[in-house]
Amino acid sequence: MRKLPPVDVVLVGFGWTGAIMAQELTDAGLQVLAIERGAWRDTPTHFPPTTAPDELRWYWRKEMFQGNARETLTFRNTRDQVARPMRRWGSFLPGEGVGGGGVHWNGQTWRFLPSDFVAASHNTARYGALPEGMTVQDYGVTYDELEPHFDRFDKLCGIGGKAGNLRGQIVEGGNPFEGPRSAEYPNPPMHMTFSQDQFIRASRELGLHPFPGPSANLTRAYVNPLGCQLAPCSYCGFCEKYGCGNYSKASAQTTILPVLMRKPNFTLKVQNEVLSITRDSTGRRATGVTHIDVDGRRYEQPADLVILCAYPLSNARLMMLSGIGETYNPATGEGLVGKNYCYQVMSAAQVFYDDKFTNGFVGAGALGAVVDDYNGDNFDHTGLGFIGGGYIANWTTNARPIETHRTPEGTPTWGSQWKAAVADNFLTSTTVGAHGASMAYATNALDLDPTYKDAYGQPLLRMTYDFTPNDRAMARYLSERTNEIARLMGGREVKVVLRDGPYDSMPYQTTHNTGGTIMGTTPANSVVNRYLQSWDVPNLFVMGAGVFPQNAGYNPTATVAALTYWAAAAIRSQYLRNPGPLVQA
């Protein structure tokens, strides 16, 4: 193994969190090295408009996602089952390559609610003790502390939307339930289509509060604070699962890398996979990482500071492989790494029209109208049998022809009748969806598989997950509310798509995997402290949605970014002056 010259900081993974952290720490004068196991990707080379909207290449052949042949994970619903490898990604799509999942996201950009950050204490105070087996806890940081960092991300990306709570004043047309904003969105909302107009009308008839979804698909030409230029969205709809060739979707490539890649104190190493975090003889200090290149050569990379910026599942696995912290054991309740794995709970209602054209091919990843009346604790949960909630929205993200085949109830699932129904309803249907939270339970967890290994002989990550009683009660409630809106949208008929039965790892749902490296207030309840610093190894920080103690009823990216800015600020203002624990245990 070749030992390389030391650096100040090594970043493991190079998506949104890696790019933000690299920009912040190079600005502080540190020598930063990012190691990404995937390839280099940039907008003009890899996502020109002539190749970006290619369903076969990017989604069905999954060229943008982590290669299952080299490393995957094993899955089971319950601990009494034998986990089997995921041979093909289905329910979620881990990104690989520069930009990570931020390349293929939709751009739906949410701030978690103030109550989401204090889910345990808030819900306990209002409704009493949490249900048996639920392991929800507070984040250890508040919305008010993160608000300046949410604002930075809004401005970095040029988010389009309409504020509903501006410095404590409720503003007409926005989300009245959101936490107070220090500034209006930097850009206006996206242009609504027929489907959103019907959703807005129906929601208002029910006394709800519809507003335009916040969007990282640019609504006008924009120059961000780093001087990066972004262009208006063309509403082609190839956002989710695709890179944007128009410079119209905020990603690391369009908002940070044009500046960062020019810096002499930043280095990016691609197609190298980090295998472990190395530590000194005390075990309390990280000394760097070991990694391997595509030719099988192994390296030791010394660093004063190690920051995990990979996908949440990969961050948890790397900590387990490196022996940092005790892996969680659901049977005994001991250990913390791998605890509180959460996902999202989705349900929908499809609306079919006879003589009205929804033209779903005219869309964008975050083109939608939303109601937040049933999210978080925005409504009274007394007697409902669950906590949490979700937003209900009508998104027009694009009726991509291979992927989109809405058909009415009673249609055969194959054959000529199915084909005819797909064609008949392709231009005249839309979906109202509920995007639900996921409350942590002791039974859902991550650990290392005892049988299956990756290409380098290391154990695969094992996921044990199923929908919980809270999930099922919440999904039923949100499905009823979704159905109410859908039936008022003026269609010929409505088809309800329920989330029932056990969790299935094959149909795509979201790529919003959270937990496993959770944050909290003490070493007894968390892997990292409120600044995302490891309690066990103080010069190790962990970014990403893995730090969420549970998942809110929102897409996670903006909260992930805000937490990254928050951690970077603490490193710059506190840690570099006095390296060591930022919170005393």
Image (cartoon, rainbow, N blue to C red):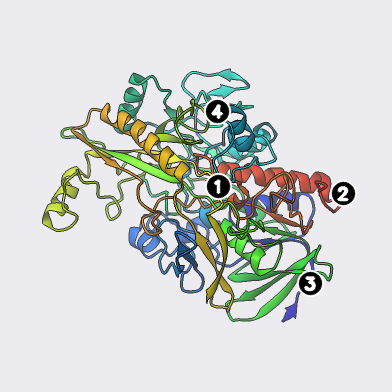
Q: Nearer the viewer, mark 2 or mark 3?
A: 2
Which residue is nearer to you in this view: 175 or 116? 116
Q: Nearer the viewer, mark 4 or mark 3?
A: 4
Tag 4: amino acid: Glu
Q: Nearer the viewer, mark 3 or mark 1?
A: 1
Q: Secondary structure at mark 4?
A: loop
Q: Secondary structure at mark 1?
A: loop
Disc on res. 5: 3
Does label 4 or label 2 sit earlier along the sequence?
A: 4
Pointer 2 residue: 577
Residue 355 shows up from this direction: yes
Tag 1: amino acid: Gly
CA separation, marks 3 and 1?
A: 48 Å
Disc on res. 178: 4
Does label 2 or label 1 sit earlier along the sequence?
A: 1
Q: Secondary structure at mark 3?
A: loop
Which residue is nearer to you in this view: 314 or 473? 473
Look at the numbered discs 2 and 3 and tell me whether their residues touch, using CB distance below 8 Å: no
Disc on res. 331: none
Tag 2: amino acid: Arg
CA separation, marks 2 and 3?
A: 23 Å
CA separation, marks 4 and 3?
A: 47 Å
Pointer 1 residue: 133
User: In percent of the image, x 54 and y 77: which residue is there?
Assistant: 455
Q: Secondary structure at mark 2?
A: loop
Quarter of the image where the N terminus is located: bottom right
Locate residue 107, reporting x and y percent: 48, 43
Mark 2 nearby-residue class (10 Å; few <14, some 14–19, many ≥20):
few
Q: Is residue 164 left or right of residue 401?
A: right
Would you identify the image quadrant in which residue 34 lies?
bottom right
- Check the image and report above or below for 127 versus 462: above
